[in-house]
Image (cartoon, helix red, strand yellow):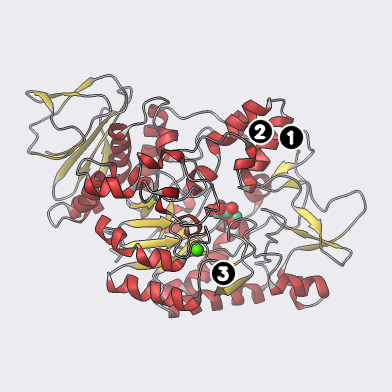
Amino acid sequence: MTRKWWHDKVAYQIYPKSFYDSNGDGIGDLPGIISKLDYLQDLGVDIIWLSPCYSSPLADQGYDISDYYKIDPRFGTMEDMDRLIAEAKKRNMYILMDLVVNHCSDEHEWFQKACEDPDGKYGNFFYLREKKEGELPTNWRSYFGGPVWDDLPGTNKQYLHVFHKKQPDLNWENPEVREEVYKNINWWLDKGLGGFRIDAIINIKKALPFQNYEPDREDGLCSIKTMLKEANGVGKFLGEMRDRTFKKYDAFSVGEVFDEKPEEIPDFIGDDGYFSSMFDFNETIFGQSQKGWYDAKPITPDDYKRCCFESQKKIGDIGFLSNIIENHDEPRGVSRYIPDGDCFDKSKKMLAALNFMLRGLPFIYQGQELGMENMSFHSIDEIDDISTLDEYQVALDAGLSQEEALKVASRYSRDNARTPMQWSDEENAGFTSGTPWLKVNPNYTSINAASQLKDPDSVRSFYKKLIALRKSPEYKETVVYGELTPLWEEQHNLMAYSRKGDKTLYVIGNYQREEQSVTLPGACQKVLLNNYPDLQADGNTIRLYGYQVLILEM
Ligand code: GLC
Ligand code: CA
């Protein structure tokens, strides 16, 4: 594996709308981010991924872009963006933008022009089909529910949208579309961006010609994933994109890739892969059901361990995964991966260390470093996210009561991660002086940055230590490149592994409330990190406290 500039970095995801509001309109913005760069630098962050802040009607919170060359006025101006890039650079930080090019917004000029003249140049920017009464071009269900087809306004045609109807899919088969995308990427890279996170990219290749598949629910539709499974040749587009853009700049790119085939991994993230890295979603997709969230199976500590190790084994040293505990599309990781009733600082730190020490590039999602938790939603009206509203309806249609459906929606809602960042115990968690666009989690009085900054034992201080360890001259080589081998793999509710580089480190987490023991094969040289003040050892046998995590040098 060739060494790259970004391997030893630590990345942090910002969801701009909910990060910090500088002007009191209740919406986070770029000047707000700039004012918090020192906070991020203090934590040890190098790479910042911004969820979309381009011009957008925000139907899917910015993942519906109406102008790829403009900043949405709600988030600021292009001058703010330039300033953010420059201020980041001063601190040796890199900014990644979100590249959303499977689709644009129905308010994008291209789509407007396609409506005016569906047989002209811009009609071919999208997937259009003649409208037939009582029949859809195909029976595919969109990710956010309902058919993927809607009427193209003012015409006798329909257009394809695999996500929301305000997110028409771009026709990547059309070279003119691809040229527009590359032009845009290079324009941003010329501005000095560090690279991109690449949204929903597997969807750009459709199985042609379009056809119906076996329906999988009573609505007579089939999951969009059924079509994607049949689609071959996404690599041709991705390779071209790499060569025409990222490669020339040595930019960092991380793909949101689902369902890749094992034999394709080298193509995706090998030495000359389409992307620098891709996210590991093995834990996040665990327990998913075709039927919907209401049928999903919760994940246990043993499942969590298995998922992590499976990914590690699959990737080996082919490339670098990007490891996450959560993102803006998922509930809070501590609420999901820590058994109910056990979510407190010790267990949060354990989860942090187990994930952070995996081989790959760690990504922290805003507030994760504080141990921010899921929201408890009291009514579906408190939820804004379109995907959650759909899943709520799916649960009701399946016969769940309103109360049960709300429970399901709350458990998995993307809005759990989108509640405003908890900066302090002041009003609205110090996020805004106005009315926040989404309700603040009421636990901000106990979970917030201001108090954790002062507390050497806080979850944030623990994250800071983890980051410092990854960067320390002594251990860096091992933490970044060391080979990972699972330890005591069959021991119930224990997740442990070694990292072998020029040093040997053991990461051991007791993933339960009860104590349990492990016997080390040799003497421990040094305890590098411990989420308890002490360690119960008898010779080489360690009796681990509930949710104790240790990083040992052997
Ligand atoms: C990705 C984004 C998600 C968005 C979807 C459509 O999965 O992370 O937030 O809704 O793509 O753009
Ligand atoms: Ca604002």
On the rendered image, what quadrant is the C terminus found in?
top left
Marks 1 and 2 sit apart, C-alpha to C-alpha, by 7 Å
Quadrant of residue 236 in the image? bottom right
Instruction: Identify the element where label 3 is drawn.
Output: loop
Vertical position of residue 417 compared to residue 181: above or below: above
Q: x, y percentage for residue 421? A: 42, 51
Picture residue at 58% right of the left edge, 57% below the top: 61
Q: Residues within 10 Å of mark 1 (few under 14, many from 20)?
A: few
Is label 1 in contact with label 2 (beta carbons under 8 Å)? yes
Helix, strand or loop for disc 2: loop
Task: Looking at the image, tell me whether mark 1 or mark 2 is earlier in sequence order.
Answer: 1
State yes or no: Cβ of the residue under disc 1 lies below 8 Å from any atom of ligand 1. Answer: no
Label 2 sits on residue: 291
Could you tell me which residue is drawn at 76 percent across and 55 percent down? 210
Q: Which mark is residue 72?
A: 3
- Amino acid carrying label 3: it is Asp
Q: Quadrant of ligand 1?
A: bottom right
> To which residue does mark 1 refer?
217
Residue 156 in the image: above or below residue 210: below
Q: Is residue 447 visible?
A: yes
Q: Where is residue 24 shown, x and y percent of the image?
A: 49, 61
Residue 295: image x %, image y %?
Answer: 61, 29
* Mark 1 or mark 3, earlier in chain: 3
Q: What percent of the width, then of the height, locates residue 244?
A: 50, 76
